[in-house]
Amino acid sequence: MIDSLDIAFLLADKSTTNLFPSVVTHLISSIISPLIENDYDIRLALNTYKSTENSSIAITHPFTKSIHLFKDYLSMDKINARQENIQLKKMSICKTLMFFRMKILSINILGDILRSAFRFEWRPTSSDCFHENVVFLITDDVPCREFLNPSKAHDPDAPCACDQLEKISNDFLDGNFTLIVIGVGELVSICDSLYADTARNTGGEYIPLTNAARVLHTVVESVISQGYTVSQSLRHIKEEEYEKNSSFCCSRLSKRNQCEMKHCQVMAHKGVWLLNRCRQPSY
């Protein structure tokens, strides 16, 4: 049974309007409220990350036990006001550079916000109590621009954000962080299997927003009534519960991995054949 729980919510937003619809704040409230009502030892942290074509704004709120303070952090009006204030300050600074186009967008926005989880002060697990660390990534963006324009020529030597997700996922696993990714909007469905692989490696899961409230309600109930960890509770949920009303397909993950393995085997055989052919003496 969990004695204490640290939860960090990472909101990564690519939209040009307000951060996220109110359904996201309601979702977060539905996750934490039953735990608080049942007197769980819980701390909450929030990192909002809004990126546009030419800029990115990050606002970090450290762990707190105060639910009132966290709900203040979570207020959409205040989040957007803080981000607009930061944006106005950036605009005033850049007025003298109006003839230059400043691109401060990170190569890997989602990688940056996932790594930001390590900067929070998490409580360690001790032999006296069982502690669990959970990270929620709620995003409407893709990790790599190539998903949006695969036909466009890209620099093969440039770092790819997708390659970094595997390392970040392994770092989460080593740090005992369970990652749950919630996809918002249709754009995320392009890479839902990649997000699912990244989360499942840590014991977490990918959940489309349309199913998140229902699935996570069941998860929280299992934590409270059965004494399961969040990771254990996710494994008890049937795959169709993740897939309902969305294009996400859990079974596609294993099929995709099998296809990738088959592709690697074929390419390996070709490589051996080419190597042997190159070694043959020419007459």
Image (cartoon, grey):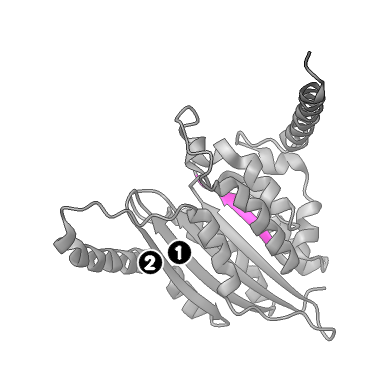
For the N terminus, the quadrant is bottom right
Q: Which residue is mark 1?
A: 48
Magenta-drawn segment: 178-184
- For mark 1, does the 10 Å Cα neighbourhood hold few (<14), some (14 to 19), or many (20 or more) residues? many
For the C terminus, the quadrant is top right
Residue at the location (69% across, 70% down)? 133
Residue at the location (24% across, 69% down)? 89
Considering the whole magenta stretch, tell me its main secondary structure.
strand
Residue 24 spot, x, y in % from top left:
50, 56
- Amino acid under label 2? Ile
Picture layout, residue 190 above or below residue 54: above
Relative placement, left or right, of 94 versus 267 is: left
* Residue 9, quarter of picture: bottom right
**Labels 1 and 2 touching (C-beta < 8 A):** yes
Residue 24 visible here: yes
- Amino acid under label 1? Thr
Q: 183 or 256: nearer the eye?
A: 256
Residue at the extreme bottom: 128
Picture layout, residue 265 above or below residue 241: above
Residue at the location (54% across, 48% down)? 159
Assign a secondary structure to mark 1: strand
Relative placement, left or right, of 221 versus 106 is: right
Residue 186 visible here: no
Residue 163 spot, x, y in % from top left:
62, 47
Residue 37 spot, x, y in % from top left:
64, 75
What is the spatial separation of the Cα atoms under label 1 and label 2, in whole angstroms? 8 Å
Q: Which residue is mark 2?
A: 79
Relative placement, left or right, of 21 versus 215 is: left
